[in-house]
Image (cartoon, rainbow, N blue to C red):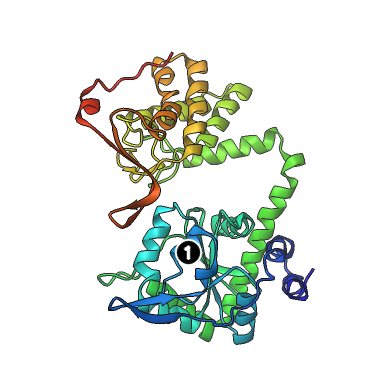
Amino acid sequence: MSPQTSATRRLLVGTAAALAIAAVCAEGTGRAAQSSPGVRVEQVDGAVRYTNRLIDEKSPYLQLHAHNPVDWYPWGEAAFERARREGKPIFLSIGYSTCHWCHVMEAESFSDPAIADLMNRNFVSIKVDREERPDVDRVYMSYLLASTGEGAWPISVFLTPDLKPFEADTYVAPDREGRPGFGKLLQIVIRDWTQNREKVMAAASAGTQLIASQAGASAGSASAVNARALDQIYGDLKAKYDEANGGFGRAPKFPRPAVLNFLLRHYARTSTKTSLEMALRTLHAMANGGIHDQLGGGFHRYATDRDWHVPHFEKMLYDQAQLAVSYLEAYQITREEQFAKVRGLPVVHHVNNLIGRPGLDAVVHCGEIGGHVVEAAVALADQRRISRPLTIAID
């Protein structure tokens, strides 16, 4: 273990979350500091062009931010050492290359020179690709979930120089029309860090305890899962269930196939009809709603409203695979014909549409159209396909 990594680990000893955070910090912290730190500014074709440390990274997501005016660091000892030396808080942003709101926040906030100046003067800013460092993502997502009750990307979390979280959010819109946004959030954190450090450190201690509780629950899950724990999960889901529209919680609404599969298994184990009703109501609502691509098949990543009507136009392979299981099991239990028809659509969509078939005018995977980054898959169907009956029979 390098002396740098040992120093990082020692700083975390003595907190309840030391083991969880130190495990994340132990790897990948040996990156040498860049010879020319900061942001390079130059004129390119009459326009200002910024280049920061991320230009040397391999991750597509980090490369996306390589020309921000923000003085980004990759996750590593160079960033940690600077934060300790200068006594500055860390702003940690975690996302991935096909994340819609990650792209939006990059364009709205991280490309803004005024926001960048505020960040550069008051924070050490770190950018992480969750697909490159899932260990870092797991630790701070656990804090976000425990502290706010919700989790999504990008993760926007503020840390002390010894990596203890004290404030977290997801996508934060910019300040606009008098409504506070990301700029105001930065100013609040700066004020608390400079004027009320005790409050910040107390929040950081509480944050490490939240991470420790999450890590402890994960470590003990293999032996502690029993009927009582499963029933408690069922009770928590029932409390969040939307009886009017199906699904759980407020908008945006995600399919959450793992939850639906859990409810179907809970019904099989306990014969609790409410478990089955919650799962079936949700599956019906999704199949009949806009989240279900009625033309091309498959399901969009989430609905922007609580009624499942307005989709977010992004499709994830893992959702299609898990929802196929959910609809198949619902059909096995109920023998309802709708489930039999829907269950194959996600697989049919991604095997056929994403590979290509006659009538498909364009399929793009995380590329560019007209100079703009396009996430996931975008398909344009010709008039002949749209005019066909919108029913697909599954053998």
Which residue reaches farthest front?
A: 45
Q: Residues within 10 Å of mark 1 (few under 14, many from 20)?
A: some
Quarter occupied by the N terminus: bottom right
Q: Is residue 206 left or right of residue 95?
A: right
189 vs 270, nearest the viewer = 189
Residue 380: percent from the left, percent from the top?
Answer: 27, 38
Give 111 or 162, whichever is nearer the viewer: 111
Q: Quadrant of residue 283?
A: top left
Q: Is residue 33 above or below residue 130?
A: below
Residue furthest toward the right?
A: 1
Q: Please indicate, yes or no, whether residue 387 appears anywhere in the rendered image.
A: yes
* Residue 241 to residue 7: above or below: above
Q: Which residue is mark 1?
A: 63
- Locate residue 226, reporting x and y percent: 71, 35
Residue drawn at x 25%, y 70% is 177
Residue 123 position, x and y percent, is: 51, 79
Q: Residue placed at 38% from the left, 39% from the top?
A: 300
> SS at mark 1?
helix
Percent across and percent down for residue 288 are 33, 28
